[in-house]
Amino acid sequence: MTRNLTEEAIDEFSRGEETAEAQRKSGAYLVGVTEPGESPAEARDHLEELRELVGTLGYPIAGETMVSIRAPHAKYYLGSGKAEEVCGAAKEANAELLVFDTELGPSQQRNLERLARINVVDRQEVILDIFAERAQTREAGLQVELARNQYFLPRLTRAWSHLSRQRGGAKGTRGEGEKQIEYDRRMVKQRIAQLENELETVRRQRDVQRKGRIRREIPLAAIVGYTNAGKSSLLNTLTGSEALVEDKLFATLDPTTRKLQLPNKSELLLTDTVGFVRKLPHSLIEAFKSTLEEAVLADFLILVLDCSSADVESHWQTTLSVLGELGAQEKPILTVFNKSDRQKDGLIRTHLRALAPDGVFISCRTGEGLDTLRETLTAFLKKRTRIDDLQIPPDRPDVVAAVYSRASLLEGEYLDDGSFRCTVRIPCAQSDFFAPFSRSMIEHKMEEYR
């Protein structure tokens, strides 16, 4: 992990990185937290997921415990007595890393490290580390670095011991000079601004690519779902691509778009997006907006669920929740239950089918249900979108804006009178909104008037 700070800061941090492998051998002690309004069963599910996340980073589990809190405490997040108990248990387990399944404040993290005398991290930092290991493209690397700099900015005093030093003031100036921590904070803020500018450039490039797809009149479906549900496997199986597939959380971070030819010879673009997870840090949602907004701009979504998982329904709700944060919750959704070869329980299948009557059960491994899925995609696309010619008067810029936000512009031009004539692909759910501006409707009304 590289931080773009001063050379002293980087050197100090690098010395800490050298102990990472030793920590992994010694193991991590996990602390699950039942927070107000959360059931013990939900908290236990979250802890099991944390165990898998930590395992993805290569840490053996030295031990774990569950704690309940009525409200977060300012000093340790837990009460003082419970914090001492947890730190003592981690020491007895010979753990070199204490991992909390919640989001800790910078001061809480520092206080716990002083108490435990080992490194303390929270769920957010674990996910950030996984993302840092998995980022392959320039865009993903920029997004991860931005999220990590934003996360570590208030934690600088935790990471480096040299930050109490002071930088001397210039000749003729008053005062004792600038503290090292102030200098490093300024450097981090400058790097954050630089990363945001670079990402904005990448987003503009991605917009150009999207406009190119729109001009080719090819509809787009975004594959979304919980991490490790089989999204990349589905993309590979349907299109013959070679996106990375691993039985790990967050195996791929970068969006991959491939073309699929449907049984009726029509074409559909499929985009694989980063997987979702419970308690996904908001900083990562923000940082990966340019990747996740593929879901917002798609004509419809293919929601992939692992039907063999005991947590399939909670994964379903988590995915819908994240889609809501992105503003994509109202997109048409086709539900696909993957790994059906592992789920032989007829009652569970019946229950899931009742929740999603139009859902399709498939197995990317055995090929079960893939032909049905292709036929369903063909019918789904035909029913969910239509192409229409619109003429929008000059006094309705709101409708022109809606063309870009609610539909897909295929071609358009402004006429001499200021009106906007265009051909668009419209989701059927938006037909009523655009109907008054349909040229066929306008011509029909003019014929009636004559």
Image (cartoon, helix red, strand yellow):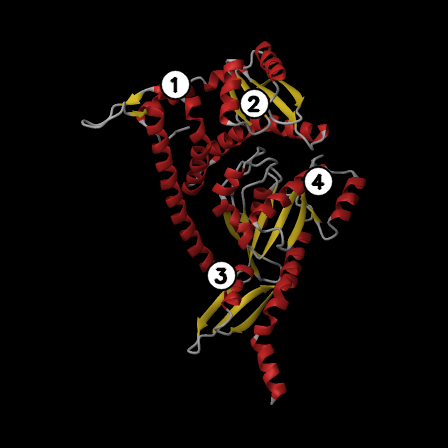
Mark with earlier residue (4, 1):
1
Nearer to us: label 4 or label 1: 1
The residue carrying mark 3 is 214
Viewer can see residue 102: yes
Q: Which percent across, then down, holds residue 324?
A: 60, 47
Q: Are marks 4 and 1 in contact (CB under 8 Å)?
A: no
Q: Is 33 located above or below residue 203 in the figure?
A: above
Mark with earlier residue (3, 2):
2
Q: Which percent across, then down, holds residue 9?
A: 35, 24
Mark with earlier residue (4, 2):
2
- Please tell me how crowded label 3 is: few (under 14), some (14-19), or many (20+) other residues with Cα within 10 Å: some
Q: Which percent across, then down, holds residue 430?
A: 61, 64
Mark with earlier residue (1, 3):
1
Residue 99, label in figure: 2
Q: Alpha-carbon distance for marks 4 and 2?
A: 26 Å
- Please tell me how crowded label 2 is: few (under 14), some (14-19), or many (20+) other residues with Cα within 10 Å: many
Question: SS of the residue at dot 1?
Answer: helix
Residue 161, label in figure: 1
Viewer can see residue 119: no
Q: Amino acid at mark 4?
A: Glu
